Amino acid sequence: MESQAPSTTKDRLLDAAEELFSSRGIDATSLRAITSAAEVNLASVNYHFGSKDGLVKTVFLRRLEPLNNERLELLDALEISAAGAPIELEAILDAWVMPALRMGHSPEGKRIKRLMSGIYSEPGDTLQALLRELFSEILRRFCAAIGRALPELSGEELMWRVHFMLGAMIHTVADQPSIRALSGGLCDPSDIEGVRRRLIGFVAAGLRAPLEEKNAPPTAGEDR
């Protein structure tokens, strides 16, 4: 098996690791299990990736880098078309969410969704730090675009709202079966256009929500 071209061996390791990580969890999956599934020897992991951490990073990069590149291409096109003017908020959100929704319905996307949904249950903070690294540049670009669309928001308020936005979007993409089960089949997560329309409308409303007045007295019915 090892006589195959290095690229073939590398792809087989990535495929095996992605499948096992998504079904068993990253920490619970040994390198020996991966190399056995890929039918290669243990030394091939070090040759191609340096370590298990390097393999994990490449598994994420293989799926998330094309996704984020597509998002940035869409945002670039919007900025060119706007010629320096603020971009419509819904268009910015669409550039973020639609590539993820499309990816989520592909066979590879279903595996990476399972992987992403379990990442915060993994021990330590190495994986969370990896995701922050992979998303730092694209988040900077999208936060800047949203900030220009909503100039009334302070930097602090913008980041809180983007944080809540990401929570809604990640949960929607990564855990689609829940809405079907909770609604008794009334809601269909495979309706990409319907999900897109509802999610963008919901998130846009949250981003545009009126600013809270500091030290304002509680309204009737609120705890005092």
Image (cartoon, helix red, strand yellow):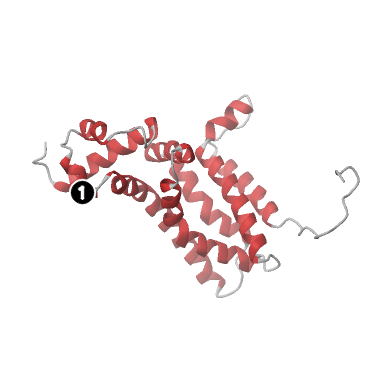
Count the marks: how many? 1
Q: Position of residue 212 (x, y in %)?
A: 78, 58
Give the farthest residue toward the left. Answer: 3
Q: Residue at x 15, y 37 (%)?
A: 41
Q: Residue at x 38, y 30 (%)?
A: 23
Residue located beneath label 1 in the image: 48
Q: What secondary structure is found at the residue carrying circle 1? A: helix
The answer to which of 218 and 11 lies nearer the viewer is 218
Amino acid type of the residue tagged 1 in the rendering: His
Relative to residue 100, is residue 86 drawn left or right? right
Give the farthest residue toward the bottom. Answer: 84
Q: Is residue 55 depicted above or below 36 in this figure?
A: below
Q: Position of residue 117 (x, y in %)?
A: 48, 38
Q: Position of residue 219 (x, y in %)?
A: 89, 49
Q: Is residue 148 depicted above or below 187 in this figure?
A: below
Q: Position of residue 27 (x, y in %)?
A: 37, 36
Q: Residue at x 62, y 24 (%)?
A: 184
The answer to which of 194 and 199 lies nearer the viewer is 199
